[in-house]
Image (spheres, grey):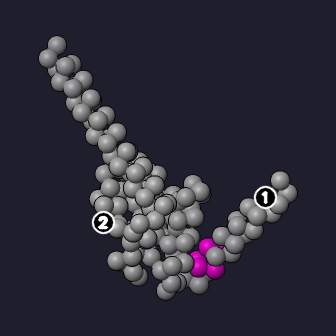
Amino acid sequence: LVDLAKQNHFKYSSYRYLTHNINLRGQCKNAYIYNFLGYLEIKYDINVKEGLKYVQKALILDPQNEEYMDSLAWGLYKLHKCEDAYEIIKNVHIDDEEINYHKKMIKRCLHDTRKNNKQNKRRTSKKKKR
């Protein structure tokens, strides 16, 4: 348990150090660092909206990077913006276990969203007919 706490403290300290230095220095020109920080914030639910800002900066520097696109899609998924997430993730063609998991979850979310929308439309039309 102590080792786990030390590991988590190290991860959090590293994260805080990186974010502090990037924010202190202003413009970073390293897309990898922006995506790394953004994905950490998204994956661990630290601050999904802030994480998306970092990922968007990474994509400005490297707009064709499919890993960064995946990070963006995953952040949108975490904000329950399934259709937006799907529009991005469908352009990612990397065969990676975590990315494939993201694709599966985003597709499921999209399917559930569309299913719920259809059910809501049916309920609304039934109420109008009464």
Q: Crowding at label 2, few (<14), some or many (≥20) Cα neighbours within 10 Å?
A: few
Can residue 71 be seen by looking at this rendering?
A: no
Q: Position of residue 6 (x, y in %)?
A: 80, 63
- Spatial distance from mark 1 to mark 2, Cα to Cα? 37 Å
Question: According to the image, label 2 marks what residue?
Answer: 91
Circle 1: element type: helix
Q: Residue at x 39, y 80 (%)?
A: 62
Q: Main secondary structure of the magenta part?
A: helix
Residue drawn at x 74%, y 61% as measured from the top left? 8
Q: Quadrant of residue 71?
A: bottom left
Looking at the picture, how far across and down is residue 7, in whole percent?
76, 64
Q: Is residue 8 left or right of residue 120?
A: right
When the figure is inspected, residue 64 is found, relative to residue 53, above or below; the finding is below
Which residue lies at the image location 38% right of the left edge and 45% below the top edge? Answer: 109
What range is drawn magenta here?
19-23
Label ID, residue 4: 1
Query: What is the three-letter code of the residue carrying label 1?
Result: Leu
Residue 45 falls in which quadrant of the image? bottom right
